[in-house]
């Protein structure tokens, strides 16, 4: 006699076929979670590959910027200069005059720009970070802010960066900056000559400032933006190396960032240099800086303040993390022009 099976028994038997002998329902949940995690992992890998492919395509098919023509990207009161700090090394520099002279600057040659350096307006040498060149949007942003306040800006591409020739080394970077400083001083009369160092440029700034002291000279003022403690950071408990964030998150990103320094051994010790300097100093740092934590800015400030024993000569300016400036965005802050102006005015008293 054929046994009849009701619906509830069929459901039970179906469930039994899915569950292997000795397998508990909890095991099935673990397997389901593992499958879900693997699905998300595959999606993440796909997005990384897609992003990398887009970066490659943009680099291959985009029109390269002609750094010898700053007017092509809207810098219409800027001239391109090539200097030779050493035999076989040519570095590119953009000289932007104060904004109030932009009409005068139209069509002018290098001789006019060189003479303009002696007009009495403060001068800033701008030293950028470790990737790209002087045309990066946030670097142009700082140049425009300084120019709008009424200052000259000399934005340097170190050797090996942009269209500058040569191999970038720690000694070479500082040689380039020293050469530019002396070139500016020979043309600027009694004008203030300050330096703005961002990220990697902060270490180049303080290392060069120490070398200037050895020559009996100094910058009139220093601004450090997104500064680290030193480029090694191996014994620093506050943060990892400031440029590894991209590399551990996306291991192959360095090939798409075109970083000339990825194989170089750097020191650039801000923490040691700041103990030696007596130059008026302003440290700018965003609380949400994703490469160099704000605690590093506080430590740099502590070191510099102790060395100079002064609240007036050493300033720390904090930018609230809710503003979203991260590591490169301080140029967007509406209060930045006044902050810079007050600092420069303090150098004149």
Image (tube, grey):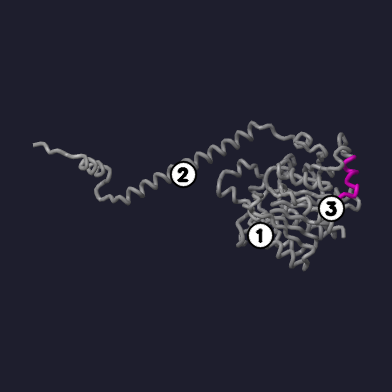
Q: Are marks 1 and 3 in contact (CB under 8 Å)?
A: no
Give whichever of 337, 276 is nearer the camera: 337
In three-dimensional space, the C-alpha distance between marks 1 and 3, rounded to whole angstroms, equals: 26 Å
In three-dimensional space, the C-alpha distance between marks 3 and 2, rounded to whole angstroms, equals: 52 Å
Where's residue 105, x and y in %? 87, 38
Q: Is residue 96 left or right of residue 1?
A: right
Q: Is residue 38 left or right of residue 236?
A: left
Residue 68 visible (yes or no): no
Asked if residue 246 is positioned above or below residue 3 in the image, the reply reads: below
Q: What residue did someone put label 2 on?
A: 41
Dividing the picture into quadrants, the one containing residue 8 is: top left
Q: What residue did someone put label 1 on?
A: 296
Asked if residue 191 is positioned above or below residue 280 in the image, the reply reads: above
Quadrant location of the C terminus in the rendered image: bottom right
Q: Residues within 10 Å of mark 2 (few under 14, many from 20)?
A: few
In the image, is residue 62 part of the stretch drawn in magenta?
no
Quadrant location of the N terminus in the rendered image: top left
Give whichever of 44, 206 is nearer the camera: 44
In the image, is residue 116 part of the stretch drawn in magenta?
yes
Q: What residue did someone put label 3 on?
A: 193
First along the sequence among labels 3 and 2: 2
Mark 3, secondary structure of its residue: strand
- For residue 170, the mark is none
Dividing the picture into quadrants, the one containing residue 228 is: bottom right
First along the sequence among labels 1 and 3: 3
Where's residue 288, x and y in %? 63, 53
Dividing the picture into quadrants, the one containing residue 144 is: top right
Q: Residues within 10 Å of mark 1 (few under 14, many from 20)?
A: many
């Amino acid at each position: 006699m054929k046994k009849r099976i009701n619906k509830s028994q069929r459901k039970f038997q179906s469930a039994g076929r899915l569950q292997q002998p000795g397998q508990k329902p909890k095991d099935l949940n673990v397997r389901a979670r593992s499958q879900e995690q693997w699905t998300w992992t595959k999606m993440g890998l796909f997005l990384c590959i897609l992003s990398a492919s887009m970066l490659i395509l943009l680099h291959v098919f985009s029109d390269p910027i002609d750094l010898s023509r700053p007017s092509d990207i809207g810098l219409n009161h800027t001239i391109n200069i090539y200097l030779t700090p050493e035999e076989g090394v040519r570095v590119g520099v953009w000289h932007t005059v104060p904004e109030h002279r932009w009409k005068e600057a139209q069509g002018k040659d290098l001789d006019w720009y060189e003479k303009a350096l002696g007009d009495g307006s403060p001068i800033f040498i701008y030293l950028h970070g470790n990737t790209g060149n002087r045309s990066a949007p946030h670097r142009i942003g700082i140049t425009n802010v300084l120019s709008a306040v009424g200052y000259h800006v000399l934005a340097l591409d170190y050797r090996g960066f942009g269209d500058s020739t040569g191999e970038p080394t720690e000694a070479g970077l500082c040689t380039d900056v020293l050469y530019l400083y002396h070139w500016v001083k020979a043309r600027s009369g009694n004008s203030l000559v300050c330096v703005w160092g961002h990220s990697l440029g902060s270490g180049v700034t303080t290392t060069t400032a120490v070398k200037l002291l050895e020559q009996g000279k100094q910058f009139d003022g220093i601004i450090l933006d997104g500064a680290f403690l030193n480029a090694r950071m191996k014994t620093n408990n506050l943060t990892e190396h400031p440029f590894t964030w991209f590399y551990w998150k996306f291991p192959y990103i360095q090939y798409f960032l075109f970083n000339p320094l990825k194989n170089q051994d750097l020191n650039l010790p801000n923490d040691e240099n700041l103990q030696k300097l007596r130059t008026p100093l302003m440290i700018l740092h965003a609380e949400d800086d994703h490469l160099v934590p704000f605690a590093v800015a506080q430590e740099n400030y502590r070191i510099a303040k102790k060395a100079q024993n002064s609240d007036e000569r050493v300033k720390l300016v904090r930018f609230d993390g809710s503003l979203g400036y991260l590591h490169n965005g301080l140029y967007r802050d509406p209060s930045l022009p006044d902050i810079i102006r007050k600092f420069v005015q303090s150098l004149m008293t």
